[in-house]
Amino acid sequence: MEGGNRGLFDYGPPGTALQTNIGDAWRKHFVLEENILELNCTTLPPEPVLKTSGHVDKFADWMCKDPVKGEYLRADHLVESVLESRLSRGLNGPYKDSPKLEEAGASEYHNTLAKIDNYDGPELRELIKRLDVRNPDGNGEVNPPTPFNLMFKSTIGPSAAAPVYLRPETAQGQFLNFKKLLGYNQGAMPFASASVGKAYRNEILPRSGLLRVREFLMAEIEHYAVESSIVDNETLGYFLGRVMLFLLKIGLLTSYGWIECVGCADRSAFDLTVHSAYSGSPLVVKEVLSEPVRVEEWQAVLEKKLVGPRFKSDAKAILTSVEALDQTALEQLATQLTEKSSTFVELTSDLLAISKVTRTSNTREYSPNVIEPSFGIDRILYSLLEQVYWHRPHDAARAFRSVQVFSLPLAVAPTKVLIVPLSAQPQFMPIAHKLSARLRSLGISNNIDSSSASIGKRYARNDEPGTPLGITVDFDTLADGSLTLRDRDSMNQLRGSEDEVIQAVKNPAEGIESWEEISRRLQPSQTAMRT
């Protein structure tokens, strides 16, 4: 009504229900079945969090500007679209129609496209110049690429003194809560945390519907493993398998092309390590060993009696800095003190002694390595809709027009059941409302269509939004209480008692039974019209 911005979308009732159902299926498949600890973290982390993680300095895309049109373009997408266009013209017609293809060679174009996600700014600048890449809209030259940070920045409070950002991912909130999560899990390893929520990225040029947007729903898991070798092999492989099973469960196939809906990253111990270093609060696991072990480590001893008088008010800061040094830093400083008698903070060897000592320990401390399966719920939703959409052909014999159908699985469909009274006669409606209430009490969403249209038309218009099942209340229902159950995709109909039909709806919704299995225990409908 009042305008809008690209890359921001509202979901209506069916879309909201579909998104919610995908999220619920995700929680059941991962959080419940894997016993994962779920968090709900703030979407406004303070600047130091994202500064420490590297997002403030490095979370950027390379951007070009068309100075004539004033249009901003993402550099890698610009190169990609231009090269693909040239290849298409060259491969589908004479090469003279695509002179740039002759100059560079098709093989170079293919090699460039295969590595397009890996080029940095200077490399993209060189490609744009050498291959004469221009804005397809007007063929204008573009300026050299410049970095553009993808985070939305804001401030907290009336003084605007504390900068914050809308989070670009849910992961950082999980890492900051690692110590509390470990305690909640009674110190047991390995374990995983998860978070579902909105994330924000100020995309240069949102496009392709829900595939590249500025506000989106993420579902992320951080699995904290004990050793890096387990992360690289067992854990990563396990989650890849679980991810595939989840996507198949909700009906995802492959037909659009290459769209990244899920990423499984090995984040090693980077995030926990950098947040530990910045905060001074170690995000580590302390494991009690079954048998004591002898540990050789570097140890720093600061001569406080000498440091205090010499550095006065700076002494406390020096002490804090020395205590925060890890083993790698201590080893480097030990070498410097031996060779130069001092290090960059001008602590001479009489003030600071670093030596390697051996001690007996009943525990060991380590920063766990992390595997991160990250799900773009909106991308999954978009891909699912694209893949399950089809047309039921026109049926002249029964005067059925061509019908658009979304074959959404029962587990995620916005409305799972359509209840259709045979007509608007008063005796059918109490049964329909009672059936609707009973289904809702089981968590099964449904609608009643009591319009004057034929049953066939009512079913057809509910096939379009993807309602998987239909129940008909007819004159036989009045006589013996039986109901007709219709399958959306096959249009086959079965007959059973109210309890049997409700069970036949409930079981597939819970993944217990398929339509084929139900067809073997319920009788085909003899009285209802096959629609």
Image (tube, helix red, strand yellow):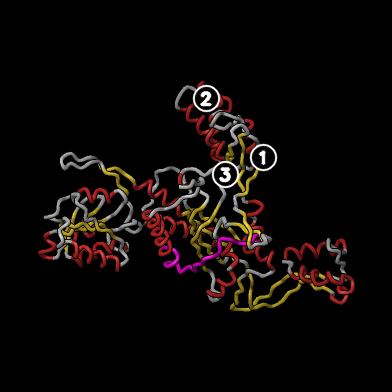
Q: Is residue 132 magenta?
A: no
Q: Which residue is mark 3?
A: 204
Q: Earlier in the sequence, mark 3 or mark 2?
A: 2
Task: Tell me where the magenta segment starts and ends, as one range.
Answer: 29-49
Residue at horizontal 49%, vertical 43%? 207
Looking at the rendered structure, the kind of residue marked 1 is Pro
Looking at the rendered structure, the kind of residue marked 2 is Ser
Residue at horizontal 11%, vertical 65%? 480
Q: Which residue is mark 1?
A: 122
- Closer-to-camera residue (261/191): 261
> Residue 491, relative to residue 94: is it above or below?
below
Residue projecting furthest to the left? 479
Q: Earlier in the sequence, mark 2 or mark 1?
A: 2
Mark 2 in CB contact with mark 1 (< 8 angstroms): no
Residue 400 lies left or right of residue 102; in this view the side is left
Residue at horizontal 56%, vertical 28%? 139
Residue 133 visible somewhere in the drawing: yes
Mark 3 in CB contact with mark 1 (< 8 angstroms): no
Q: Position of residue 495 (x, y in %)?
A: 16, 59
Mark 3 to mark 1: distance in Å?
Answer: 18 Å
Residue 245 visible somewhere in the drawing: no
Mark 1 neighbour density, 10 Å: few (under 14) some (14–19) many (20 or more):
few
Looking at the rendered structure, the kind of residue marked 3 is Ile
Q: Which residue is mark 2?
A: 98
Residue 493 lies left or right of residue 62; in this view the side is left
Mark 2 neighbour density, 10 Å: few (under 14) some (14–19) many (20 or more):
some
Q: For numbered disc 3, what is the local secondary structure?
A: loop
Residue at horizontal 38%, vertical 48%? 385
- Closer-to-camera residue (427/442): 427
Mark 3 to mark 2: distance in Å?
Answer: 29 Å
